Image (cartoon, rainbow, N blue to C red):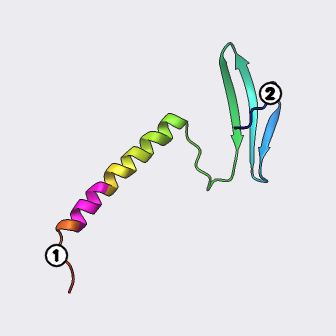
Amino acid sequence: MLVLTRKTGEAIQIGEDIEISVVSIKGDQVKLGINAPKNVEIHRKEIYLTIQEENNEASKGIDNLLNILPKKQ
């Protein structure tokens, strides 16, 4: 893991397309601004993990459905 120190108004660049800026700092809370192409999905980590879990559950349902359907000969 790369750890960087930034102040309000400073940024980091990821590749050519993604910039993360420190918008404000209040106490233990940091507000970030992210500039990225529209095709890059950006989620809070807890939301990302929830999406992954839901996708895994949904794919289990599809797998179960495929297992009970008759196979083409």
Pinpoint residue 11: horizontal percent, then vertical percent.
80, 36
The quadrant of the rendering that contains the C terminus is bottom left
The circle on residue 27 is none
Question: Who comes first in sequence, dot 2 or dot 1?
Answer: 2
Q: Residue at x 79, y 44 (%)?
A: 13
The circle on residue 5 is 2
Pinpoint residue 3: horizontal percent, then vertical percent.
75, 32
As displayed, is residue 34 above or below residue 9? below
Q: Nearer the viewer, residue 35 or 59?
A: 59
Instruction: Give the quarter of the image for residue 29.
Output: top right
User: Callout 1: few (<14), some (14-19), or many (20+) C-alpha neighbours within 10 Å?
Assistant: few
Residues rendered magenta in the picture: 60-66
What is the CA distance from the residue labelled 2 to the residue labelled 1? 59 Å
Disc 2 is placed on an element classified as loop
Instruction: Give the quarter of the image for residue 44.
Output: top right
**What's under tag 2, amino acid-wise?**
Thr
**What's under tag 1, amino acid-wise?**
Pro
User: Callout 2: few (<14), some (14-19), or many (20+) C-alpha neighbours within 10 Å?
Assistant: few
Q: Nearer the viewer, residue 52 or 23?
A: 52
Pinpoint residue 4: horizontal percent, then vertical percent.
78, 31
Disc 1 is placed on an element classified as loop
